[in-house]
Amino acid sequence: MDTPPKNNLPSYPVSSTVYCLYSDLDQGIMDYGPSLNLTETCPGLFEITPASGEVRLKSVPDRDKGIVHDNNGICTLTVEAKEGQRYPQSIPGRDVRTEEVTITIEDVDDNEPQFNSKSYDAIVAENTPNGVPIILSSTMRVEDIDQVNLVFGTCLKKN
């Protein structure tokens, strides 16, 4: 009636299943139990099962594009637990509790590097000694949208 639901597990270990479990602290007053609502910074990615409080993926996250990319891989969920409305004498504002859950989407190396051109040209004079740097006629750029394994090597092949 006037005591907001209490979160039973205030922090979650990394790599665990996230449950948002709440208890009604109004002793001796039977209510319909807290209802759970979810708002998120990565819309459509997560859902909550009201009966168990389990937070689940609703769709496959992609760290490299869309809202997950725009949020730098960090999704914040705001879970709202609200007491049932069986008793109209509940004090407005005191029957709701919110908690934030931050979920970091880690990047996996699932995109290959992309060069800015399919081929590059260079001219080397006859009798050029070993060890002389070769200068390309255009700049070679390589991009990889993944956030991991950002190391590249180049190899020149003779046509």
Image (cartoon, rainbow, N blue to C red):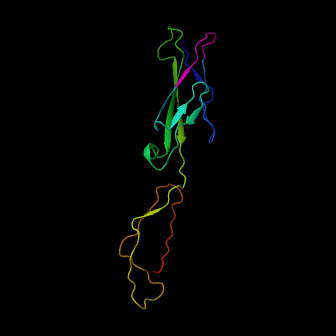
Q: Quadrant of the N terminus?
A: top right
Q: Is residue 31 magenta?
A: yes
Residue drawn where x is 60% and y is 13% of the image: 26
Residue 73 image position (x, y, % from top left):
49, 45
Residue 105 image position (x, y, % from top left):
53, 45
Q: Quadrant of the C terminus?
A: bottom left
Give the magenta-colored segment's residue range: 25-36
In the current view of this chain or complex, which residue is farthest to the bottom?
127
Q: Quadrant of residue 84?
A: top right
Residue drawn where x is 54% and y is 10% of the image: 86
Residue 16, relative to residue 25: is it above or below? below
Front residue of this view, candidates 155 and 79: 155
Q: How many marks?
A: 0
What secondary structure do most residues of the magenta stretch adopt? loop
Residue drawn where x is 51% and y is 61% of the image: 150
Front residue of this view, candidates 26 and 49: 49
Residue 82 image position (x, y, % from top left):
52, 20
Q: Quadrant of residue 19?
A: top right
Residue 17, relative to residue 65: is it above or below? above
Residue 42 image position (x, y, % from top left):
46, 38
In the current view of this chain or complex, which residue is farthest to the front?
159
Residue 45, relative to residue 110: is it above or below? above
Q: Is residue 101 magenta?
A: no
In the current view of this chain or complex, which residue is farthest to the left?
137
Front residue of this view, candidates 156 and 104: 156
